């Protein structure tokens, strides 16, 4: 097993490392919650040679080289998994083997291992790094520990979409879960309907930074963010505001975004969010309401039509560096 003492030995020789993974969770909690057979750390790719020499001095040998994504060094006690990152405009980015990327936001979060302070990922980054794969029992335990320690909300599959849910304003502790739900929804709903590169380009770290800014300082006074989920969880969300269409009258409102996690489909989450969005827009003086949805998304279009919305014939092309897709507009007029 990879002990706390061994962790501190590694960190003493790799002082710029940021602890990730299970030991990163335990650092946040301030105590060891389970046994570990490895140590995950985020390190700079351009420091790779120095780090390898340092680990070699501790008896570690390279067992896997997947640069520029990761490198694994192993000794009889376990292994060190080096997540390699490089500077970008938004943070420290890791290039993934399939061509996607993940941006780590490395702040001044400090935790405790073996009674010593260590740099570790923030609770939000822990949530994001635990998304995008099928979690095991240790992952579920780690996310439960992060949520209990920090109040961070969890997305499915860590939070269940079964049973009762409430609607609440999105708070900072919801943002990571919102980002995960949006990506999960895009993958499930849009695969095969828009260029795959557009979906693959979603970077959860960058999404988190953008959404955190939106929650702290909404872009307009009438922008509203609503999360749906059980206490401590997010399984859907919506964003509403005045309509952004060119030439739209002052009394036209817009449902800008509405997503439910795939595990929450057909469970009333989307309809509850949409009814709440309509009621909120109406109560703030908007009469005509609009929304845009992917033209080829028959499931979403059928949902909106069941809820009383009508396509008005307008279309727009959304351009993206990885491709373009067509959206169609829906309207809801009067009560």
Image: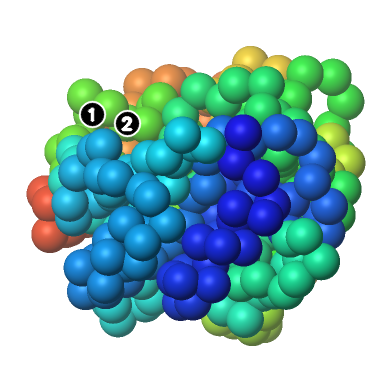
Res 50 label: none
| Residue 298 x, y percent position in the rendering | 36, 22
- Is residue 164 in view? yes
| Residue 268 x, y percent position in the rendering | 72, 23
| Residue 72 x, y percent position in the rendering | 32, 44
Residue at x 63%, y 16% (from the top left corner)? 266
Residue 173 found in image quarter:
bottom right
224 to 26, vertically: above or below: below
Viewport quadrant of the N terminus: top right
- Closer to us: 1 or 163: 1
Residue at mark 2 to residue at mark 1: CA–CA distance: 5 Å
Residue at x 49%, y 50% (from the top left corner)? 40
Q: Are marks 2 and 1 in contact (CB under 8 Å)?
A: yes
Res 190 label: 2
Q: How many marks?
A: 2
| Residue 141 x, y percent position in the rendering | 75, 32
Q: For mark 2, give the secondary structure.
A: helix
- Is residue 293 in view? no
Residue 285 found in image quarter:
bottom right
Is 153 left, or right, of 327 in this rendering?
Answer: right
The coloring applied to the image is: rainbow
- Closer to us: 302 or 51: 51
Is 220 left, or right, of 209 in this rendering?
Answer: right
Residue at x 27%, y 65% (from the top left corner)? 53
User: Which residue is under mark 1?
Assistant: 193
Residue at x 40%, y 25% (from the top left corner)? 188
45 to 238, vertically: above or below: below
Q: Residues within 10 Å of mark 1 (few under 14, many from 20)?
A: some
Is 30 left, or right, of 67 in this rendering?
Answer: right
Q: For mark 1, give the secondary structure.
A: loop
- Closer to us: 7 or 208: 7
Is 237 left, or right, of 227 in this rendering?
Answer: left
């Amino acid at each position: 097993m990879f002990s706390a003492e061994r962790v501190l030995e590694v960190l003493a020789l790799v002082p710029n490392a940021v602890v990730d993974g299970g030991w990163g969770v335990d650092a946040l909690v301030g105590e060891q919650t389970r046994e570990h057979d490895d140590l995950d750390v985020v390190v700079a790719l351009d420091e790779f040679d120095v780090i390898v020499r340092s680990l070699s001095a501790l008896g570690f040998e390279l067992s896997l080289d997947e640069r520029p994504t990761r490198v694994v060094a192993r000794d009889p006690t376990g292994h060190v998994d080096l997540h390699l990152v490089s500077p970008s405009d938004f943070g420290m980015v890791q290039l993934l083997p399939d061509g996607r990327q993940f941006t780590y936001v490395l702040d001044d979060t400090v935790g405790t291992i073996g009674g010593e302070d260590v740099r570790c990922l923030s609770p939000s980054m822990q949530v994001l790094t635990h998304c995008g794969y099928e979690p095991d029992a240790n992952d579920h335990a780690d996310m439960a520990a992060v949520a209990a320690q920090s109040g961070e909300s969890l997305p499915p599959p860590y939070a269940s979409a079964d049973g009762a849910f409430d609607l609440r304003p999105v708070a900072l502790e919801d943002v990571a879960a919102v980002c995960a739900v949006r990506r999960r929804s895009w993958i499930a709903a849009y695969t095969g309907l828009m260029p795959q590169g557009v979906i693959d380009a979603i970077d959860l770290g960058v999404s988190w930074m953008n959404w955190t800014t939106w929650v702290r300082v909404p872009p307009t006074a009438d922008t509203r963010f609503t999360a749906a989920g059980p206490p401590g969880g997010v399984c859907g969300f919506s964003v509403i505001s005045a309509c952004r269409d060119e030439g739209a009258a002052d009394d036209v409102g817009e449902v800008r975004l509405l997503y439910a996690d795939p595990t929450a489909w057909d469970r009333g989450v989307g309809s509850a969010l949409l009814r709440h969005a309509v009621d909120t827009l109406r109560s703030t003086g908007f009469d005509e309401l609009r929304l845009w949805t992917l033209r080829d998304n028959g499931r979403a279009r059928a949902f909106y039509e069941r809820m009383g919305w009508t396509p008005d014939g307008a279309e727009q092309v959304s351009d993206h560096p990885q491709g373009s897709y067509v959206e169609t507009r829906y309207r809801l007029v009067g009560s």
